[in-house]
Amino acid sequence: MNPFVLLGALGLCGLVLAQPAAAAAGFAEGLRLCAGSVLPALFPFFVVCELAACSPAARRVASRLGAPLRLLGLKSDAAPMILLLSLLGGYAVCAATVHRLRGQLSDREAALLTLLGCCAGPGFTVGCVGGLLLGSVRLGLLLYGVQLAANLLCAAAAVPFLPPPGNAVAAVQNFLSPVSLPQAIGRGVDSCLSVCGCVVFFRMAGAVLHWGAVGSALLEVSAGCAAFAALGGRAALFGCCFCISVLGLSVWAQLALLLDGCVSLGPLLISRALHCTVYPALVWLCLRVSPGTASVFSSLQGRVIPTVRLAPDAAVITAAFLCAALYNSGKKFYNK
């Protein structure tokens, strides 16, 4: 293990022991975030992506995007479906699907899909950031659309750092074996547990470190967005842009875990560094030419409304996830 990582881990353990109340509060907050936001947003997408990744019908639908994607250098038959699922499901679905279909992509295509598809999904950007934190679903839609444009521009700038061009893998004759719904649910549970573990850990770390809004953004994207939203005014909007661009250590840990070394994160790091400048600039430009949008965030109050109970849809999805997790764990235990 890297000595600096070891020292950081030991220091964090010391802070947890010195501040047990703060650590417990951060742990509980991480669990609430997973139950109220992460699981409802990601678990259904993980299951659907597992089913679609092995479905010839889903690939035929996604193949309609093949022509424009070939202009970007994505020639494999699996690339359109991976990108479509990534844009709908966000960074976690992107990493999980690229890893799942890695054998049907060239090295350059896998890296490029990671650059284009690693984004905050519409559930988080539109619903959580726009609707809940900034008080405008319209503004959330703007943030989501501009984010995808910024991904494209920054991916183009990072092209020189991608692996050299190689022969695209013909996926038409190399489909993965179809999976059943229980198998897809089991794999979705495993992926969600990895994501939730990262979220809870970095939430607890942020609680004991007592960092401000910028520090929270560097640790975990949702915590950073909530901290900036509490500031109100333009700081709320452009602070959330910063959080979405940086992604935070939690997301980077999830990407490394889900990709499992099949794609280098170096080009993505360069792309996201550019994203921190390009994304806020594009948002500012769009607000200048969109009358009436600026008033949404200029009147924000410095407060965050806490959620005291789960919404019905979040409760149903969380219950389904817990049942699937218990079934999956029991099956693995008794099989041994």
Image (cartoon, rainbow, N blue to C red):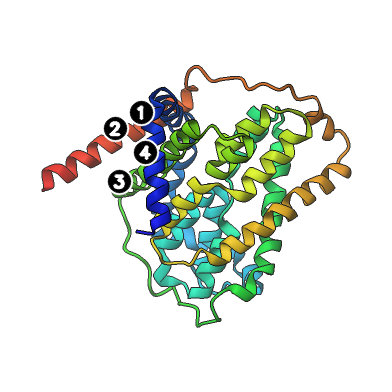
Q: Is residue 35 above or below residue 8?
A: above
Which of the marked residues, 1 or 4, is nearer the chain's N terminus?
4
Q: Measure the C-alpha gap from mark 1 to mark 3.
A: 15 Å
- Asked whether the beta carbons under mark 1 and mark 4 sit within 8 Å of each other, the answer is no
Q: Position of residue 320 (x, y in %)?
A: 35, 32
- Asked whether the beta carbons under mark 3 and mark 2 sit within 8 Å of each other, the answer is no
Q: Measure the C-alpha gap from mark 1 to mark 2.
A: 6 Å
**Tag 2: amino acid:** Cys
Q: Quadrant of residue 161?
A: bottom right
- Left or right, 39 with respect to 152, comes to left
Please tell me which residue is depicted at 38% across the width and 36% down the height of the picture: 14
Q: Position of residue 314 (x, y in %)?
A: 46, 28
Please tell me which residue is depicted at 35% across the width and 42% down the height of the picture: 193
Residue that label 2 marks: 323
Q: Is residue 310 above or below residue 15?
A: above
Which of the marked residues, 3 or 2, is nearer the chain's N terminus?
3
Asked whether the viewer can see residue 138, the reply is: no
Residue that label 1 marks: 319
**Tag 1: amino acid:** Ala
Q: Nearer the viewer, mark 4 or mark 2?
A: 4
Badge number at residue 13: 4
Nearer to the camera, 277 or 139: 277
Which of the marked residues, 4 or 2, is nearer the chain's N terminus?
4
Q: Measure the C-alpha gap from mark 1 to mark 4.
A: 32 Å
Asked whether the viewer can see residue 183, the reply is: yes
Please tell me which residue is depicted at 62% across the width and 31% down the height of the picture: 227
Of helix, strand and loop, which one carries label 1? Answer: helix
Residue that label 3 marks: 186
- Left or right, 228 with respect to 254, comes to right
